[in-house]
Amino acid sequence: MYKILIIEDDPKIAELLRSHIEKYGDTGIVIDDFDHVLEQFEKHAPHIVLLDINLPSFDGYYWCRQIRQISTCPIIFISARSDKMDQVMALENGADDFITKPFYFEIVIAKIRSQLRRVYGDYAAKGQERTVERNGLTLYPERMELQLGDQTVTLSKKEAILMETLMERSPRVVSREVILEKLWDDAFVDDNTLSVNITRVRKRLAELGMEQALETVRGLGYRLNMNWKDRKQG
């Protein structure tokens, strides 16, 4: 089951898109907070995005650029703008496809399925997929998924980078400085931003039943302790 994020300020169109998507067994997620689109993207970690151009506050081109800074997931513009330059701008800003309104829902679904096959399915690159594994916990950085046993959670790009950094060094402590460099490449970031990302990763681990695995080592940094169950029971 794939997650499709719908960024469309016409609630009727958004709901119709969601309904058609779910008829095909996938999950349609409609957002209505157009001031915090990127936060919603990171929260839901979708496999594909349907994006309108005319949105409140910032237009779709802006949000496409923001998403492209943290993700390579397919983005399809759906807009009433039919001028060739609008399509060129969409592609130049990072979009993968463009659909003009009014549209046939069957065309939208076909284009969604095509992008999903290209990126995640039959037409995806067949090169060896990179994985990071520690004591049964497996991270798939390229698809941004974390798996333990038969349970899988989806990560945002920042969460995947953070998990990879912690897993590669486990059981050693990873300093805040190393994490900051990995996540933001030496850009200035306040402590609260890092804490928010640590909290998000703890939440993903908790979804896998690993509530106590990520430790805070006061004054040093963080450690992923894969023996947390033994320590907790002892």
Image (tube, rainbow, N blue to C red):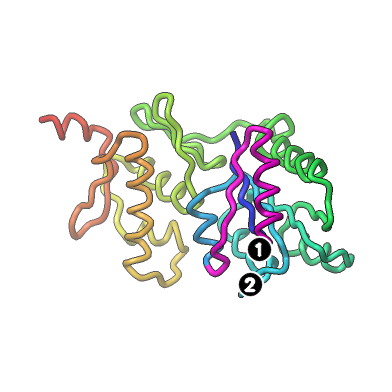
Q: Is residue 153 magenta?
A: no
Horizontal placement of 169 versus 228: left or right? Answer: right
Q: Are marks 1 and 2 in contact (CB under 8 Å)?
A: yes
Of the pair 135 and 10, the residue shown nearer to us: 10
Disc 2 is placed on an element classified as loop
Q: Is residue 19 magenta?
A: yes
Give the position of the C terminus as an image quadrant: top left
Q: In terms of sequence position, does the residue under pointer 1 or pointer 2 come before the other?
A: 1
Q: Amino acid at mark 2?
A: Pro
Q: Quadrant of residue 190?
A: bottom left
Residue highlighted by disc 2: 56
Residue highlighted by disc 1: 9
Residue furthest front as drawn: 12
Is 74 drawn above or below residue 77 in the view shown?
Answer: above
Q: Quadrant of residue 87?
A: bottom right
Q: What residue span does the magenta drawing correspond to?
A: 9-35
Is 168 drawn above or below residue 37 in the view shown?
Answer: above
Residue furthest bottom as drawn: 57
Q: Residue at x 62, y 36 (%)?
A: 26
Disc 1 is placed on an element classified as loop
Q: Residue at x 52, y 66 (%)?
A: 36
